Amino acid sequence: MSPDISLIQRVFSYEDLNKKINAIVTWNHKALDEAEKLVKREIEPYPIAIKDIIDVKGMKITMGSRVFIDRVAQEDAFVVKRIRESGGVIIGIANTHEFASGVTTTSSVHGPTRNPRDLNRIAGGSSGGSAAAVAAGIVPVALGTDTAGSVRIPASLTGVYGFKPTYGVISLEGVFPLAPSLDTVGILASNISWIKRIFRIIVFKRDLDKIEKIFDKKKDILSRIRIGVPRWFKASEEVYTEFMNKISSIEFVEVEMPDFERKVLKYFPVIRFAEATSIHIKYRDKWDLYFEDVRQLMIQGLEIPAHEYIEALNIRRELYREFKNTLKRYSIDFLATPTTPIPAPLISDVIGNELRVRGMLSTINVMFPSLLGLPAISVPSIEISGLPVGIQLIADRYHDLLLLELAQELKTNKLL
């Protein structure tokens, strides 16, 4: 079958729907021309949306901020170059919480993104526009970024797949930083096949080789799946009940990780806030233009002394060793938690209360994979009063393909 542009054409039939959800904040009206050029080269074009902190040459990339409202990217980010080379057509730029520094995508110069499952509710964040674009069917796949759950949280709240890869295996060139030792480019998609496809396109080849070798060596473990469930995961009563019902169809063991929760909750914010403030200190004369919740987080970073930051980096290494020992002690290869403790809150309950809602959604469930650089995926699985909540699966570093295969097998066999 000859390649055609029908998938790209279909995207633009969603422009009226997008006005209701505000997922895409800038459309690429050259997309059809770009698709036709690919077809002439016998390349099948596919549509993809890109989060508003990842540079796309010639398009407005604003970081969701008044500070950069007129900024036009001069070059493609590394991952965007890879996407284009593979036949990807960037159909538009997806909304983000300002500077990717929030979990609600309500603090954005472009206005809040609404959840396609219920337009009165948030889509989550900070990759809320990317998640909503996928959930609404505008695109089958989108790029986001994840520093403390910013791909996985909106994936959970909108009922799509959200994958955070192993830290460092995807280039951050051309991506506006939040906390550089935690930041990752992530993928949101309607199915795992899309995640696998895009991951292979954007991952460094050297890392893909390593990841594939680990997969080939360990893939037999997928025939005898055994998952660990940390005792300290956070969930509302309803989510806890539904999560335990789902996970009971899989062989699992509850795992003890002494003092793990306390240390993650103490030291993760030190790294995240200190690094974010170090990035934004050069814009301090413009902090009055920042949204209030984002500005308050920058101020928190000013209060962190250097010795606490160094201590946090050392503790992070200790916690990774503890994680490795836990896998070995319980003879497990994966952990599972609810991605978010609750379904999506109402927008009316969030605006003006972003920091409070942040505490409700950005929990140890999503923090610890980011802190330790682990791959993690939110899989749509739970429904609470008609609203989605994801189940998060976590693996060791460089076990990305094993993790994706696990998620696919569990969904195919209707175990999640």
Image: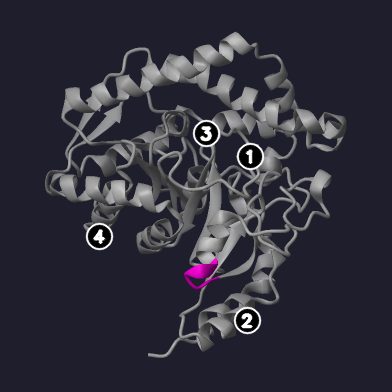
Residue 390 appears at what percent x and percent y? Answer: 41, 46
Q: Earlier in the sequence, mark 1 or mark 2?
A: 2
Q: Which mark is residue 412?
A: 4
State which tag comes first along the sequence, 1 or 4.
1
Is residue 344 shown left or right of residue 196? right
- Residue 353 seen in render: yes
- Distance between mark 1 and mark 2 Cα atoms: 31 Å
Circle on res. 32 = 2
Q: Which residues are magenta?
A: 84-88
Residue neighbourhood size for the residue with mark 1, other residues' Cα within 10 Å, grouped as few (<14), some (14–19), many (≥20): many
The answer to whether mark 1 and mark 2 are in CB contact below 8 A is no
Amino acid type, label 4? Thr
- For marks 1 and 4, give the one nearer the viewer: 1
Residue 352: give x, y in percent of width and height.
75, 35
Q: What residue sits right under mark 1 in the picture?
A: 177
Q: For the residues marked 3 and 4, what is the alpha-carbon distance in whole angstroms?
A: 31 Å
